[in-house]
Amino acid sequence: MEVDQKYETHEYDVIVIGAGGAGLRAAIEASAQGVRTALLCKSLLGKAHTVMAEGGIAAALGNVWSEDNWKVHFRDTMRGGKLLNNWRVAQIHAQEAPDRVLELEEWGALFDRTPDGLILQRDFGGHRYARLAHVGDRTGLEMIRTLQNHAVHQGIDVFMECTMHRLLKDGDRICGAFGYWRESGRFVLFKAKAVVLATGGLGKIYKVTSNSWEYTGDGMSMGYHAGADLIDMEMVQFHPTGMVWPPSVRGLLVTEGVRGDGGTLKNSLGQRFMFNYIPEFFRAETAETEEEADAWYTDKTKRRTPDLLPRDEVARAINAEVKAGRGSPHGGVYLDIASRRSPDYIKRRLPSMYQQFLELADVDITRQPMEVGPTCHYVMGGLRVDAETTATTVPGLFAAGEVAAGLHGANRLGGNSLSDLLVFGRRAGLYAAKYAKDHPGALAINPDEVEASARTMLAPFEGNGGENPYAIHADLEDCMQNLVGIIRTEAELERALDELAQLKRRLARVSVEGNRQYNPGWHLALDLHNMLTVAEAVTRSAIERKESRGGHTRDDYPGLDPRFARVNVVIRQVRGDMSVGQEPLPEIPDELKKILEEKV
């Protein structure tokens, strides 16, 4: 029996896997190019991590500071990424972000406004100027609402609660994907001339994370197993401010917008400790008030406050304060906006944060400080893509958003994620559609490939090894949190590799009970294949990069090493095994080097 007769089958020109900001924007663009497009999402439409990006969309509109432009944004992005960024990706992003924000406004997004009626922009860590277009602290929600409405109006076919497990190939090129319906467990086959991966990150491999259950590294793992390269996987961003109490919400994101609107970080002694983690001549120890200290710092650095240093630097500072015994009662530090802003201002500018702490922690942030600490939030690494087209190293496979690497280098600046989704989501849809048009022939699905995938997916029901998927996942989270976390050493990373190998052997003996109809244990067993793949990629890459740069801190190699300054750590599959190596980044053109070298 042919596979398209045995399994439910759909055929499109382009399928987009993932329905967050990047996936929606890609599907909108592909459909606008006149190709048949489908949008697949693991969860429900609208439940995307884009919603969690509360602070704003980074774009050099120049509405608050007329001096801002794409060159300054490019410089901030490259410097924030410790020059590990692909220069062309960063250039395209900075140049095109303003148009994507204005396009979103044309489609109905309701941004906060300046007195002159322009889109208001707020300060964020690592950005020289107030640059983030925002809607209170609910920017991601407004962005998803706008994109979702636009996509639905275009008539794009949407498949919800549909998880893809494997990409299919016709020779060297992608020809579709195979997966299952989460509700029924029935298998489903998608034929496609081009596939866009927009599946997000891998946060669920860590114990303390802002990420939801969907973030299991699916796109990175599927792309890797299909032959695509992964780069910069050691670069995991721990957002400095996640909730730490109560335990049920540990890791839940506290937007950088709190600090952008004046919030300050303090230790248990009441000290503004971030002044202690900047170079010696930037200290403001003689200032008598916080306002004087911030004014002094602004005069020296042209930035408003050290609390808005790039995320990797703030996260390490918080980690150091806690380890030194100056943390809060629940293992974090304090984030205080109550003493700096009026209750009306806080409720107007940060309505989600006000409700979040009041309802989940019984803390009124208009009167009390918040307890916060680092939480795994984002991965700068991912699939290697072409700067212009977002094409991976596998023909017919494209990637955009967090699943793709190159823009953020060693550390992502807050707000760059949302503009990344818009700029490269559009490009992914555009070039996937072009690829589909340029390859009009019939697609040949290899039935052996499909059947092998089906057998792998059903194996947990036939397993008699007695291993529990939830126990394996808990041990994976502990392994990555304790051994491949904010601060890393060679010995602990090697230990992590051994533990990951053991977890792989345990996964081969996993058993699930019941049937395929909405079986969460089975879903987790399948997700673990992806999580263990990306966890190994993160760990091997962290061993390879023997220096500290951005989101990757090695206690045994604490400084920057010029040998790694413009080098990607590359992961690829070679004869079934994971191979790790180093490759130089493209040379930065002289005219862009001049921008980077400007003294500001």
Image: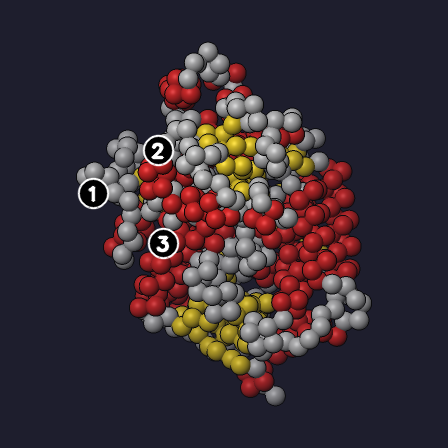
Q: Using the image as rendered, state which of residue 552 and residue 431 is in the foreground.
A: 552
Q: Which residue is mark 1?
A: 117
Mark toward the start of the polypeptide (2 vs 1): 1
Residue 143: image tag? 3
Q: Secondary structure at mark 2?
A: loop
Q: Is residue 561 visible?
A: no
Placement of 461 over or under 468, stated as above or below: below
Q: Using the image as rendered, state which of residue 86 and residue 151 is in the foreground.
A: 151
Q: In the image, residue 171 lies at what x, y percent?
A: 58, 70
State how far apart marks 2 and 1 are (Cα): 24 Å
Q: Residue at x 36, y 62 (%)?
A: 148
Mark toward the start of the polypeptide (3 vs 1): 1
Q: Quadrant of the C terminus?
A: top left
Q: Residue at x 50, y 44 (%)?
A: 362
Mark 3 vs mark 2, foreground winner is: 2
Residue 285: image tag? none
Q: Residue at x 79, y 66 (%)?
A: 466
